[in-house]
Image: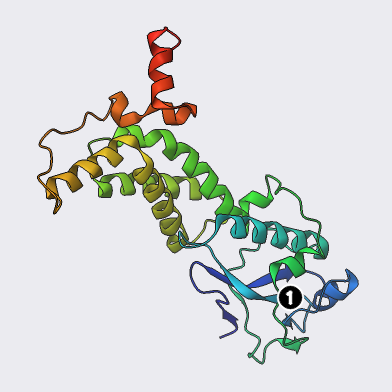
Amino acid sequence: MRYIQHNPPCMTHFICLDIDHEHGAMRWAEEYLPPPRWTTQNPKNGHAHIVYELKTPVCTSEHGSRKALEYLAKIQAGLVRATRADVGYTNFITKNPMHEHWRTEVWTKEAYELNYLADFVDLRPLTATEKEYGLGRNCSLFDTVRHWAYSAIRAHRGNTWEQWYNSVLKHAQSVNMMFSEPLPYSEIKATAKSIAKYCWKRDAYHYNEFIYRQALKGSKGGKASKRKPVPTSEQSLKPWEALGISRRTYYNHKKLGKF
C-alpha cells in the first residue's frame, strides 16, 4: 500500500507534516527543527511527509488528558507554521515509508517528548483556521459541545442515560460536519461520551436520583428511607456550596432577605 494510517483510532503516536514543495523532505533542517523519525518524498515533484514520533503518545478519547491534547494541538500547529506545511492535512494517512514508490530517509531512531518539541516552535492560541484542521478540531469539538451540554442536560432530567448520550452524540456529529475535514466517527463518539458522562454525573437532579437508588438498595446498617428526594429542593441543590459559604450562613442570610 502506498499510504497507511500511522495513528490508531483515538491515539496520536506520530505527527505528520504534509509539505507541498519540491524540497519538502528537508524543510525541517531549513527551519532548524529536530530531525524527524523519517521523511517520505515523491521523487517526481519533491513533495514530502515529515514524520515525528512521540515518546509518550497522546490519547484523544475520553480516557485522555484534555490539557495534553490542547498542548499537542498547539505544537502541531507550530510545526505546521514553521515548515509552511499544508494546514488542511488531516494527519490521518501518510506515505508508506516501506513502499518503493517513495524516497524514504530515516533521520533518527529517537522519539520526542512534547516539552522537547515545544522548545522549537512558537506556541500560541490556535487561530480560527487552525481549529478547523488537525488536532485543533478535537479541541474545538470538545469546547463547543461541552458548553452546549452544560445547559442542555436540564432538558433531559427524567430521561435515561442512553437518551442523553445519544443527544450529545447527535450534537457532536452536527458540529463535526462544520469542519472542512471532519473527524472520524470513533473520535466523535469518544468526545461525546466523555462530555455526556461528565454532565450526567454532575447534574444535581441525576446525582440525587443516583443517591435515591442507592438508598433503596439499603445498607447493612438499616433500612433505606422510602421518601424520594425532591431534585429542586435546597437540600438537594445545596446552594451554599456554590456560594462558598456554610449551610448556617446561607440560611441566616436568607432569613435577613439577602437571597
Residue occupying image coordinates x 34% and y 44%? 200
Residue occupying image coordinates x 76% and y 63%? 118
* Residue under pointer 1: 50
Foreground residue among 86 and 122: 122
Label 1 crowding class (10 Å Cα cut-off): few <14, some 14-19, many 20+?
A: many
Residue 80 lies, in percent from the top left, at 75, 62
Q: Is residue 38 left or right of residue 171?
A: right
Q: Is residue 33 visible?
A: yes
Residue 244 lies, in percent from the top left, at 49, 29
The correct choice, above or below, for 187 with respect to 147 in the image is below
Q: Secondary structure at mark 1?
A: strand
Residue 57 lies, in percent from the top left, at 59, 72
Question: What amino acid type is highlighted by mark number 1?
Answer: Ile
The correct choice, above or below, for 209 with respect to 27 in the image is above
Q: Is residue 158 left or right of residue 26?
A: left
Q: Is residue 178 visible?
A: no
Q: Is residue 230 left or right of residue 87?
A: left
Residue occupying image coordinates x 58% and y 77%? 6
What is the quadrant of the C terminus in the image? top left
Foreground residue among 54 and 223: 223
The correct choice, above or below, for 202 with respect to 249 in the image is below
Q: Is residue 224 left or right of residue 117?
A: left
What is the quadrant of the N terminus in the image? bottom right
Foreground residue among 219 and 120: 219
